[in-house]
Image: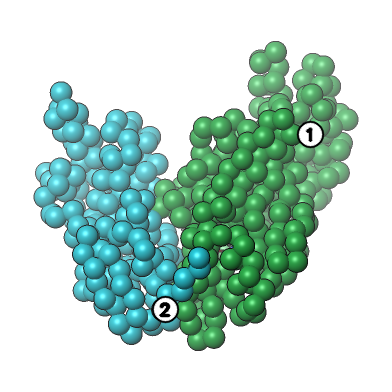
Amino acid sequence: MTYTSDEKHFELTVNGSKHQVKDSFLGASLLSVLRDHIGMTGSKGACEEGECGSCSVLLDGNLVCSCLVLAASVTQSSIVTIEGLGGATDVQQAFVECGAIQCGFCSPGLVMAATNLLDRNPDPDVDDVREALAGNLCRCTGYGRILDAVQVAVDGRKRNKL
Amino acid sequence: MPIAHPDSIEDLKEILRADTSIVLLAGGTDFMVGLNHGSTRLESDHLIVDLRSVAELSTVELDYRSKMLRLGAGVRWNDLLSGPIEDAAPCLSQSARTVGSHQIRTAGTIGGNVATASPAGDGVCALVALDASVVLTSHRGQRNVAVRDFATGPKTTVIEKDEFIERIDVPIVNGWQGYSKIGTRNAMVISVAGAAVVLSPDSQICRIALGSVGPTIIAADSASSFATTAIDWNTSSVSTDDLDQVVQLVRESASPINDHRSTASYRTHAVGVLVKRLIEQGLRSIKESV
Ligand SMILES: Cc1cc2nc3c(=O)[nH]c(=O)nc-3n(C[C@H](O)[C@H](O)[C@H](O)COP(=O)(O)OP(=O)(O)OC[C@H]3O[C@@H](n4cnc5c(N)ncnc54)[C@H](O)[C@@H]3O)c2cc1C
Ligand code: FES
Ligand code: FES
Protein backbone atom coordinates (compact mmCIF):
# COMPACT_ATOMS: atom_id res chain seq x y z
CA MET A 1 0.00 0.00 0.00
CA THR A 2 1.00 3.56 -0.56
CA TYR A 3 2.19 5.40 2.48
CA THR A 4 3.04 9.05 2.71
CA SER A 5 5.77 10.76 4.64
CA ASP A 6 6.12 14.29 5.84
CA GLU A 7 8.44 16.53 3.89
CA LYS A 8 9.68 18.61 6.82
CA HIS A 9 9.68 16.36 9.87
CA PHE A 10 11.02 12.86 9.47
CA GLU A 11 13.42 10.26 10.75
CA LEU A 12 16.63 9.10 9.08
CA THR A 13 18.77 6.09 9.88
CA VAL A 14 22.37 7.20 9.68
CA ASN A 15 25.28 4.95 10.63
CA GLY A 16 22.88 2.63 12.40
CA SER A 17 21.21 5.26 14.61
CA LYS A 18 17.88 6.99 14.19
CA HIS A 19 17.89 10.76 13.90
CA GLN A 20 14.83 13.00 14.12
CA VAL A 21 14.81 15.84 11.64
CA LYS A 22 12.54 18.77 12.47
CA ASP A 23 11.68 21.74 10.27
CA SER A 24 13.82 20.88 7.30
CA PHE A 25 13.03 23.07 4.31
CA LEU A 26 10.96 22.01 1.33
CA GLY A 27 13.15 19.99 -0.99
CA ALA A 28 16.19 19.77 1.32
CA SER A 29 18.92 17.43 0.08
CA LEU A 30 20.31 14.64 2.22
CA LEU A 31 23.62 16.51 2.25
CA SER A 32 22.12 19.64 3.76
CA VAL A 33 20.12 17.67 6.34
CA LEU A 34 23.19 15.65 7.37
CA ARG A 35 25.26 18.78 7.81
CA ASP A 36 22.78 21.38 9.05
CA HIS A 37 20.23 19.33 10.99
CA ILE A 38 22.03 16.23 12.17
CA GLY A 39 25.37 17.96 12.62
CA MET A 40 27.44 15.46 10.66
CA THR A 41 29.75 17.69 8.70
CA GLY A 42 32.03 14.97 7.36
CA SER A 43 30.24 14.89 4.02
CA LYS A 44 31.27 18.01 2.13
CA GLY A 45 29.26 20.17 -0.22
CA ALA A 46 30.86 22.02 -3.08
CA CYS A 47 28.88 21.85 -6.30
CA GLU A 48 25.50 20.49 -5.23
CA GLU A 49 25.06 19.12 -8.72
CA GLY A 50 26.68 15.70 -8.59
CA GLU A 51 29.94 16.77 -10.21
CA CYS A 52 32.48 16.72 -7.38
CA GLY A 53 31.61 13.65 -5.29
CA SER A 54 32.67 15.29 -2.02
CA CYS A 55 29.21 14.52 -0.60
CA SER A 56 29.35 10.77 -1.38
CA VAL A 57 27.54 8.46 1.06
CA LEU A 58 26.18 4.93 0.97
CA LEU A 59 22.44 4.64 0.53
CA ASP A 60 21.33 1.06 1.19
CA GLY A 61 24.90 0.05 0.39
CA ASN A 62 25.11 1.97 -2.89
CA LEU A 63 27.44 4.91 -3.42
CA VAL A 64 25.48 8.09 -4.24
CA CYS A 65 25.92 11.85 -4.11
CA SER A 66 23.97 12.94 -1.04
CA CYS A 67 23.35 16.34 -2.66
CA LEU A 68 21.18 14.54 -5.24
CA VAL A 69 19.04 12.68 -2.71
CA LEU A 70 15.82 14.26 -1.43
CA ALA A 71 16.29 13.77 2.31
CA ALA A 72 12.64 13.23 3.16
CA SER A 73 12.34 10.47 0.56
CA VAL A 74 14.85 8.09 2.16
CA THR A 75 13.32 7.58 5.59
CA GLN A 76 13.19 3.82 4.95
CA SER A 77 16.83 3.56 3.87
CA SER A 78 20.05 2.89 5.67
CA ILE A 79 22.59 5.68 5.22
CA VAL A 80 26.31 5.38 5.93
CA THR A 81 28.46 8.50 6.01
CA ILE A 82 32.20 8.98 6.45
CA GLU A 83 31.56 9.27 10.22
CA GLY A 84 30.25 5.72 10.09
CA LEU A 85 33.64 4.34 9.01
CA GLY A 86 35.12 5.25 12.36
CA GLY A 87 38.32 6.96 11.29
CA ALA A 88 40.88 4.19 11.14
CA THR A 89 39.84 1.78 8.42
CA ASP A 90 42.44 0.29 6.12
CA VAL A 91 41.47 2.71 3.36
CA GLN A 92 41.69 5.72 5.67
CA GLN A 93 45.07 4.60 6.97
CA ALA A 94 46.33 4.07 3.44
CA PHE A 95 45.29 7.63 2.53
CA VAL A 96 47.28 8.97 5.49
CA GLU A 97 50.32 6.76 4.83
CA CYS A 98 50.50 7.67 1.17
CA GLY A 99 50.03 11.40 1.64
CA ALA A 100 46.82 11.24 -0.35
CA ILE A 101 45.37 14.09 1.71
CA GLN A 102 46.36 17.73 1.40
CA CYS A 103 43.59 20.20 2.27
CA GLY A 104 41.34 17.20 2.95
CA PHE A 105 38.15 18.60 1.46
CA CYS A 106 37.79 15.80 -1.08
CA SER A 107 38.96 13.06 1.28
CA PRO A 108 35.65 11.98 2.84
CA GLY A 109 34.10 11.49 -0.59
CA LEU A 110 37.16 9.75 -1.99
CA VAL A 111 37.43 7.45 1.01
CA MET A 112 33.75 6.52 0.62
CA ALA A 113 34.22 5.88 -3.10
CA ALA A 114 37.42 3.85 -2.60
CA THR A 115 35.86 1.84 0.21
CA ASN A 116 32.80 1.11 -1.90
CA LEU A 117 34.99 0.01 -4.81
CA LEU A 118 36.97 -2.42 -2.66
CA ASP A 119 33.78 -3.88 -1.29
CA ARG A 120 32.40 -4.40 -4.80
CA ASN A 121 35.65 -5.52 -6.39
CA PRO A 122 38.47 -6.76 -4.16
CA ASP A 123 40.93 -6.93 -7.05
CA PRO A 124 40.53 -3.80 -9.16
CA ASP A 125 43.12 -2.93 -11.81
CA VAL A 126 44.25 0.66 -12.34
CA ASP A 127 41.51 1.33 -14.89
CA ASP A 128 38.85 0.01 -12.51
CA VAL A 129 40.15 2.34 -9.81
CA ARG A 130 40.23 5.33 -12.14
CA GLU A 131 36.71 4.62 -13.37
CA ALA A 132 35.39 4.18 -9.83
CA LEU A 133 36.94 7.45 -8.64
CA ALA A 134 36.07 9.48 -11.74
CA GLY A 135 33.16 11.12 -9.92
CA ASN A 136 35.39 12.60 -7.20
CA LEU A 137 37.35 15.78 -7.80
CA CYS A 138 40.50 16.74 -5.92
CA ARG A 139 42.07 20.15 -6.49
CA CYS A 140 45.25 19.50 -4.51
CA THR A 141 46.92 16.15 -4.92
CA GLY A 142 46.92 15.56 -8.65
CA TYR A 143 45.42 12.12 -7.88
CA GLY A 144 48.72 10.18 -8.02
CA ARG A 145 48.88 9.59 -4.30
CA ILE A 146 45.20 8.81 -4.12
CA LEU A 147 45.69 6.03 -6.67
CA ASP A 148 48.70 4.84 -4.66
CA ALA A 149 46.61 4.78 -1.48
CA VAL A 150 43.90 2.67 -3.08
CA GLN A 151 46.58 0.26 -4.31
CA VAL A 152 48.02 0.00 -0.80
CA ALA A 153 44.56 -0.79 0.57
CA VAL A 154 43.97 -3.40 -2.15
CA ASP A 155 47.32 -5.06 -1.43
CA GLY A 156 46.66 -4.98 2.30
CA ARG A 157 43.31 -6.73 1.93
CA LYS A 158 44.85 -9.36 -0.33
CA ARG A 159 47.63 -10.02 2.21
CA ASN A 160 45.13 -10.37 5.00
CA LYS A 161 43.21 -12.93 3.02
CA LEU A 162 46.24 -15.17 2.42
CA MET B 1 3.62 18.77 0.92
CA PRO B 2 3.83 15.07 1.65
CA ILE B 3 5.78 12.45 -0.26
CA ALA B 4 3.86 9.47 -1.56
CA HIS B 5 5.54 6.08 -1.74
CA PRO B 6 3.33 3.90 -3.91
CA ASP B 7 4.33 0.27 -3.91
CA SER B 8 2.61 -0.85 -7.09
CA ILE B 9 1.81 0.38 -10.56
CA GLU B 10 -1.87 0.26 -9.64
CA ASP B 11 -1.30 2.66 -6.73
CA LEU B 12 0.76 4.93 -8.94
CA LYS B 13 -2.03 5.14 -11.52
CA GLU B 14 -4.54 6.10 -8.83
CA ILE B 15 -2.31 8.79 -7.37
CA LEU B 16 -1.77 10.34 -10.78
CA ARG B 17 -5.47 10.17 -11.53
CA ALA B 18 -6.41 12.05 -8.39
CA ASP B 19 -3.85 14.80 -8.21
CA THR B 20 -2.62 17.27 -10.77
CA SER B 21 0.27 19.00 -9.04
CA ILE B 22 2.52 15.98 -8.96
CA VAL B 23 6.26 15.72 -9.22
CA LEU B 24 7.63 12.28 -10.09
CA LEU B 25 10.97 11.49 -8.49
CA ALA B 26 13.13 8.60 -9.73
CA GLY B 27 16.91 8.67 -9.15
CA GLY B 28 16.85 12.42 -8.59
CA THR B 29 20.01 13.10 -10.60
CA ASP B 30 18.27 15.59 -12.88
CA PHE B 31 15.53 16.67 -10.53
CA MET B 32 17.72 17.52 -7.52
CA VAL B 33 20.17 19.60 -9.56
CA GLY B 34 17.27 21.84 -10.57
CA LEU B 35 16.02 21.99 -7.01
CA ASN B 36 19.42 22.76 -5.48
CA HIS B 37 20.04 25.56 -7.96
CA GLY B 38 16.55 27.01 -7.80
CA SER B 39 15.54 26.40 -11.41
CA THR B 40 12.98 23.86 -10.15
CA ARG B 41 10.70 25.04 -7.37
CA LEU B 42 8.52 23.02 -5.06
CA GLU B 43 5.32 24.55 -3.77
CA SER B 44 3.60 23.42 -0.61
CA ASP B 45 0.69 21.96 -2.60
CA HIS B 46 2.97 19.75 -4.67
CA LEU B 47 2.87 16.05 -4.07
CA ILE B 48 6.18 14.30 -4.61
CA VAL B 49 5.79 10.73 -5.79
CA ASP B 50 8.73 8.48 -5.03
CA LEU B 51 9.03 6.06 -7.95
CA ARG B 52 11.78 4.06 -6.26
CA SER B 53 9.21 2.45 -4.01
CA VAL B 54 7.51 0.83 -7.02
CA ALA B 55 9.54 -2.36 -7.39
CA GLU B 56 7.66 -3.30 -10.58
CA LEU B 57 9.29 -0.36 -12.33
CA SER B 58 12.72 -1.95 -11.97
CA THR B 59 11.96 -5.21 -13.71
CA VAL B 60 13.90 -6.40 -16.74
CA GLU B 61 12.37 -8.91 -19.12
CA LEU B 62 14.44 -10.45 -21.87
CA ASP B 63 12.22 -12.14 -24.41
CA TYR B 64 14.31 -13.70 -27.15
CA ARG B 65 11.24 -15.29 -28.75
CA SER B 66 9.62 -11.97 -29.57
CA LYS B 67 13.10 -10.38 -29.74
CA MET B 68 12.26 -7.76 -27.16
CA LEU B 69 14.06 -6.41 -24.11
CA ARG B 70 11.52 -4.83 -21.76
CA LEU B 71 13.25 -2.42 -19.43
CA GLY B 72 11.36 -0.99 -16.48
CA ALA B 73 11.65 2.81 -16.31
CA GLY B 74 13.36 2.49 -12.92
CA VAL B 75 16.27 0.37 -14.16
CA ARG B 76 19.47 2.16 -13.24
CA TRP B 77 22.53 2.79 -15.42
CA ASN B 78 24.71 0.45 -13.37
CA ASP B 79 22.30 -2.40 -14.09
CA LEU B 80 22.69 -1.85 -17.84
CA LEU B 81 26.46 -2.14 -17.97
CA SER B 82 26.99 -5.88 -18.31
CA GLY B 83 25.40 -9.28 -18.36
CA PRO B 84 22.38 -10.22 -20.46
CA ILE B 85 21.42 -6.61 -21.18
CA GLU B 86 24.84 -5.96 -22.65
CA ASP B 87 24.36 -8.98 -24.92
CA ALA B 88 20.87 -7.92 -25.96
CA ALA B 89 21.50 -4.21 -26.50
CA PRO B 90 25.24 -3.49 -26.62
CA CYS B 91 24.97 0.14 -27.71
CA LEU B 92 22.64 0.88 -24.79
CA SER B 93 25.21 -0.65 -22.43
CA GLN B 94 27.96 1.39 -24.01
CA SER B 95 25.93 4.57 -23.63
CA ALA B 96 25.27 3.72 -19.97
CA ARG B 97 28.97 3.38 -19.33
CA THR B 98 29.55 6.95 -20.52
CA VAL B 99 26.98 8.47 -18.17
CA GLY B 100 28.29 10.64 -15.33
CA SER B 101 30.19 8.75 -12.67
CA HIS B 102 29.65 5.62 -10.60
CA GLN B 103 27.60 7.73 -8.16
CA ILE B 104 25.35 9.03 -10.96
CA ARG B 105 24.99 5.57 -12.53
CA THR B 106 23.97 4.14 -9.14
CA ALA B 107 21.04 6.53 -8.83
CA GLY B 108 20.05 7.63 -12.34
CA THR B 109 17.48 5.63 -14.30
CA ILE B 110 16.80 5.01 -17.97
CA GLY B 111 13.22 6.26 -17.51
CA GLY B 112 14.52 9.50 -16.02
CA ASN B 113 16.88 9.94 -18.96
CA VAL B 114 14.02 9.56 -21.45
CA ALA B 115 11.62 11.75 -19.42
CA THR B 116 14.16 14.55 -19.00
CA ALA B 117 14.34 14.89 -22.79
CA SER B 118 17.80 16.36 -22.92
CA PRO B 119 19.19 16.72 -26.45
CA ALA B 120 22.35 15.13 -25.01
CA GLY B 121 20.67 12.11 -23.37
CA ASP B 122 23.12 9.27 -23.96
CA GLY B 123 20.64 6.48 -23.32
CA VAL B 124 18.04 8.13 -25.54
CA CYS B 125 20.46 8.25 -28.46
CA ALA B 126 21.08 4.51 -28.22
CA LEU B 127 17.34 3.83 -27.82
CA VAL B 128 16.50 5.84 -30.96
CA ALA B 129 19.03 3.87 -33.02
CA LEU B 130 17.50 0.67 -31.65
CA ASP B 131 14.00 1.89 -32.62
CA ALA B 132 12.80 1.44 -29.04
CA SER B 133 9.44 2.61 -27.77
CA VAL B 134 8.21 4.17 -24.56
CA VAL B 135 5.28 2.50 -22.81
CA LEU B 136 3.18 5.23 -21.18
CA THR B 137 0.68 4.13 -18.56
CA SER B 138 -2.20 5.89 -16.84
CA HIS B 139 -5.56 4.94 -15.30
CA ARG B 140 -6.96 5.41 -18.82
CA GLY B 141 -4.79 2.61 -20.21
CA GLN B 142 -1.51 2.26 -22.01
CA ARG B 143 0.03 3.63 -25.17
CA ASN B 144 3.27 3.12 -27.03
CA VAL B 145 5.26 6.03 -28.38
CA ALA B 146 8.47 5.60 -30.36
CA VAL B 147 11.38 7.02 -28.35
CA ARG B 148 12.21 9.18 -31.38
CA ASP B 149 8.77 10.86 -31.15
CA PHE B 150 8.65 11.14 -27.36
CA ALA B 151 10.66 14.35 -26.95
CA THR B 152 9.33 17.36 -28.84
CA GLY B 153 12.12 19.74 -27.83
CA PRO B 154 14.61 20.28 -25.02
CA LYS B 155 12.79 19.19 -21.84
CA THR B 156 9.41 18.90 -23.56
CA THR B 157 7.67 15.62 -24.29
CA VAL B 158 4.32 14.17 -25.32
CA ILE B 159 3.63 12.78 -21.84
CA GLU B 160 0.26 13.69 -20.31
CA LYS B 161 -0.18 14.85 -16.72
CA ASP B 162 -1.68 11.59 -15.52
CA GLU B 163 0.84 9.36 -17.32
CA PHE B 164 4.15 7.86 -16.33
CA ILE B 165 6.75 5.87 -18.21
CA GLU B 166 6.22 2.26 -17.18
CA ARG B 167 8.87 0.70 -19.35
CA ILE B 168 10.86 0.94 -22.52
CA ASP B 169 10.58 -1.78 -25.13
CA VAL B 170 13.89 -2.32 -26.88
CA PRO B 171 14.00 -4.56 -29.96
CA ILE B 172 16.84 -7.08 -29.85
CA VAL B 173 18.71 -6.58 -33.12
CA ASN B 174 21.21 -9.12 -34.44
CA GLY B 175 24.46 -7.80 -35.81
CA TRP B 176 26.68 -5.02 -34.56
CA GLN B 177 25.94 -1.84 -32.64
CA GLY B 178 27.99 0.92 -31.11
CA TYR B 179 27.72 4.18 -29.21
CA SER B 180 30.31 6.90 -29.15
CA LYS B 181 30.49 10.40 -27.75
CA ILE B 182 32.83 13.33 -27.64
CA GLY B 183 33.32 15.51 -24.58
CA THR B 184 35.98 17.44 -22.77
CA ARG B 185 37.07 14.51 -20.64
CA ASN B 186 36.48 10.79 -20.49
CA ALA B 187 34.22 10.75 -17.46
CA MET B 188 31.40 12.92 -16.24
CA VAL B 189 30.66 14.88 -19.37
CA ILE B 190 27.55 15.95 -21.12
CA SER B 191 28.39 15.13 -24.70
CA VAL B 192 29.44 17.74 -27.25
CA ALA B 193 28.34 15.29 -29.93
CA GLY B 194 27.20 11.68 -29.75
CA ALA B 195 26.14 8.95 -32.14
CA ALA B 196 24.70 5.47 -32.08
CA VAL B 197 24.84 3.09 -35.05
CA VAL B 198 23.03 -0.23 -35.42
CA LEU B 199 24.05 -2.53 -38.28
CA SER B 200 22.07 -5.67 -38.95
CA PRO B 201 23.25 -7.84 -41.85
CA ASP B 202 20.34 -10.25 -41.22
CA SER B 203 17.65 -7.67 -41.80
CA GLN B 204 19.96 -5.46 -43.90
CA ILE B 205 19.40 -2.38 -41.82
CA CYS B 206 21.65 0.51 -40.83
CA ARG B 207 20.15 2.89 -38.28
CA ILE B 208 21.87 6.06 -37.11
CA ALA B 209 20.93 8.38 -34.22
CA LEU B 210 22.67 11.62 -33.28
CA GLY B 211 23.01 13.36 -29.92
CA SER B 212 23.74 16.98 -28.93
CA VAL B 213 23.33 18.28 -32.46
CA GLY B 214 19.71 19.44 -32.33
CA PRO B 215 16.84 20.26 -29.95
CA THR B 216 16.21 16.54 -29.43
CA ILE B 217 18.06 13.33 -30.22
CA ILE B 218 17.90 13.07 -34.01
CA ALA B 219 17.01 9.96 -36.00
CA ALA B 220 19.17 10.50 -39.10
CA ASP B 221 16.69 8.92 -41.51
CA SER B 222 18.14 10.02 -44.85
CA ALA B 223 21.64 8.93 -43.84
CA SER B 224 20.29 5.65 -42.46
CA SER B 225 18.38 4.72 -45.60
CA PHE B 226 21.22 5.75 -47.88
CA ALA B 227 23.66 3.64 -45.84
CA THR B 228 21.24 0.72 -45.82
CA THR B 229 21.27 0.55 -49.62
CA ALA B 230 24.92 1.58 -50.06
CA ILE B 231 26.35 -1.11 -47.80
CA ASP B 232 27.12 -4.39 -49.55
CA TRP B 233 25.73 -6.72 -46.89
CA ASN B 234 27.27 -9.83 -48.48
CA THR B 235 30.80 -8.52 -48.09
CA SER B 236 30.10 -6.14 -45.16
CA SER B 237 31.67 -3.26 -46.99
CA VAL B 238 30.87 0.18 -48.29
CA SER B 239 32.73 2.31 -50.83
CA THR B 240 34.62 5.38 -49.66
CA ASP B 241 32.42 7.65 -51.77
CA ASP B 242 29.24 6.19 -50.35
CA LEU B 243 30.53 6.47 -46.80
CA ASP B 244 31.39 10.11 -47.46
CA GLN B 245 27.85 10.59 -48.70
CA VAL B 246 26.50 9.06 -45.46
CA VAL B 247 28.64 11.50 -43.49
CA GLN B 248 27.35 14.36 -45.64
CA LEU B 249 23.73 13.35 -44.99
CA VAL B 250 24.43 13.01 -41.26
CA ARG B 251 25.81 16.54 -41.18
CA GLU B 252 22.81 17.85 -43.12
CA SER B 253 20.39 16.35 -40.61
CA ALA B 254 22.19 18.03 -37.70
CA SER B 255 21.08 21.47 -36.51
CA PRO B 256 23.37 22.19 -33.57
CA ILE B 257 23.80 25.35 -31.53
CA ASN B 258 26.77 27.27 -30.18
CA ASP B 259 26.96 27.12 -26.41
CA HIS B 260 29.45 27.02 -23.56
CA ARG B 261 30.35 23.43 -24.38
CA SER B 262 31.14 23.78 -28.06
CA THR B 263 30.40 25.46 -31.37
CA ALA B 264 27.84 24.45 -33.94
CA SER B 265 30.45 23.95 -36.63
CA TYR B 266 32.61 21.69 -34.46
CA ARG B 267 29.56 19.65 -33.50
CA THR B 268 28.54 19.22 -37.13
CA HIS B 269 32.02 18.13 -38.04
CA ALA B 270 32.44 15.82 -35.05
CA VAL B 271 29.14 14.01 -35.40
CA GLY B 272 30.05 13.06 -38.99
CA VAL B 273 33.40 11.68 -37.87
CA LEU B 274 31.75 9.66 -35.08
CA VAL B 275 29.28 8.04 -37.48
CA LYS B 276 31.98 7.29 -40.04
CA ARG B 277 34.17 5.58 -37.47
CA LEU B 278 31.27 3.63 -36.00
CA ILE B 279 30.22 2.29 -39.41
CA GLU B 280 33.79 1.37 -40.30
CA GLN B 281 34.29 -0.32 -36.96
CA GLY B 282 30.97 -2.16 -37.25
CA LEU B 283 31.54 -3.47 -40.75
CA ARG B 284 35.05 -4.59 -39.81
CA SER B 285 33.71 -6.41 -36.80
CA ILE B 286 30.94 -8.12 -38.79
CA LYS B 287 33.47 -9.22 -41.42
CA GLU B 288 35.78 -10.65 -38.77
CA SER B 289 33.00 -12.58 -37.11
CA VAL B 290 31.93 -14.55 -40.21
C1 LIG C 1 26.87 14.94 -12.50
C2 LIG C 1 25.87 14.47 -13.50
C3 LIG C 1 26.32 13.87 -14.68
C4 LIG C 1 25.40 13.43 -15.63
N1 LIG C 1 25.88 12.86 -16.76
C5 LIG C 1 25.01 12.46 -17.72
C6 LIG C 1 25.51 11.88 -18.93
O1 LIG C 1 26.72 11.71 -19.11
N2 LIG C 1 24.61 11.51 -19.87
C7 LIG C 1 23.25 11.67 -19.69
O2 LIG C 1 22.49 11.30 -20.59
N3 LIG C 1 22.77 12.21 -18.56
C8 LIG C 1 23.61 12.61 -17.58
N4 LIG C 1 23.11 13.19 -16.43
C9 LIG C 1 21.67 13.38 -16.30
C10 LIG C 1 20.91 12.33 -15.49
O3 LIG C 1 21.75 11.63 -14.64
C11 LIG C 1 20.19 11.31 -16.38
O4 LIG C 1 19.33 11.97 -17.29
C12 LIG C 1 19.39 10.31 -15.54
O5 LIG C 1 19.12 9.19 -16.32
C13 LIG C 1 18.10 10.87 -14.97
O6 LIG C 1 17.42 9.83 -14.28
P1 LIG C 1 16.88 9.99 -12.78
O7 LIG C 1 16.28 8.68 -12.43
O8 LIG C 1 17.94 10.49 -11.89
O9 LIG C 1 15.77 11.10 -13.01
P2 LIG C 1 15.11 12.13 -11.98
O10 LIG C 1 16.05 13.23 -11.71
O11 LIG C 1 14.51 11.43 -10.83
O12 LIG C 1 13.92 12.65 -12.90
C14 LIG C 1 14.16 13.41 -14.06
C15 LIG C 1 12.83 13.81 -14.69
O13 LIG C 1 12.18 12.68 -15.24
C16 LIG C 1 10.89 12.50 -14.68
N5 LIG C 1 10.71 11.06 -14.54
C17 LIG C 1 11.57 10.17 -13.97
N6 LIG C 1 11.09 8.92 -14.08
C18 LIG C 1 9.91 9.00 -14.73
C19 LIG C 1 8.92 8.04 -15.16
N7 LIG C 1 9.07 6.72 -14.91
N8 LIG C 1 7.83 8.50 -15.81
C20 LIG C 1 7.68 9.81 -16.06
N9 LIG C 1 8.56 10.77 -15.68
C21 LIG C 1 9.67 10.36 -15.03
C22 LIG C 1 10.93 13.26 -13.37
O14 LIG C 1 9.63 13.70 -13.03
C23 LIG C 1 11.85 14.41 -13.70
O15 LIG C 1 11.16 15.42 -14.34
C24 LIG C 1 24.01 13.60 -15.43
C25 LIG C 1 23.56 14.19 -14.24
C26 LIG C 1 24.47 14.61 -13.28
C27 LIG C 1 23.96 15.22 -12.02
S1 FES D 1 28.30 18.45 -3.56
FE1 FES D 1 27.41 16.60 -4.21
S2 FES D 1 28.62 16.09 -5.89
FE2 FES D 1 29.40 18.04 -5.38
S1 FES E 1 43.17 17.22 -0.89
FE1 FES E 1 42.40 19.20 -1.32
S2 FES E 1 40.81 18.77 -2.70
FE2 FES E 1 41.75 16.87 -2.50
The residue marked by circle 2 belongs to what chain?
A: A
Confirm if mark 1 falls within 8 A of ligand 1.
no
Looking at the rendered image, the disc whose residue lies closer to the viewer, 1 or 2, is 2
Q: Residues within 10 Å of mark 1 (few under 14, many from 20)?
A: many
The quarter in which the C terminus of chain A is drawn is: top left
The chain letter corresponding to green is B
Does A82 sit left or right of B253 as displayed? left
Q: Which numbered marker is on residue B206? A: 1
The residue marked by circle 1 belongs to what chain?
A: B
The chain letter corresponding to cyan is A
From the image, tell me which residue sits under label 2. A7
Which amino acid does the dot numbered 1 rest on? Cys
On screen, residue A158 above or below B129: above
What residue sits 36% from the left and 51% below the top? A62
Does B113 sit left or right of A51 as displayed? right
Q: x, y percentage for residue B190?
A: 55, 55
Q: Residues within 10 Å of mark 2 (few under 14, many from 20)?
A: many
Residue nearest the viewer, comparing B134 with B246:
B134
On screen, residue A52 above or below A27: above
Which amino acid does the dot numbered 2 rest on? Glu
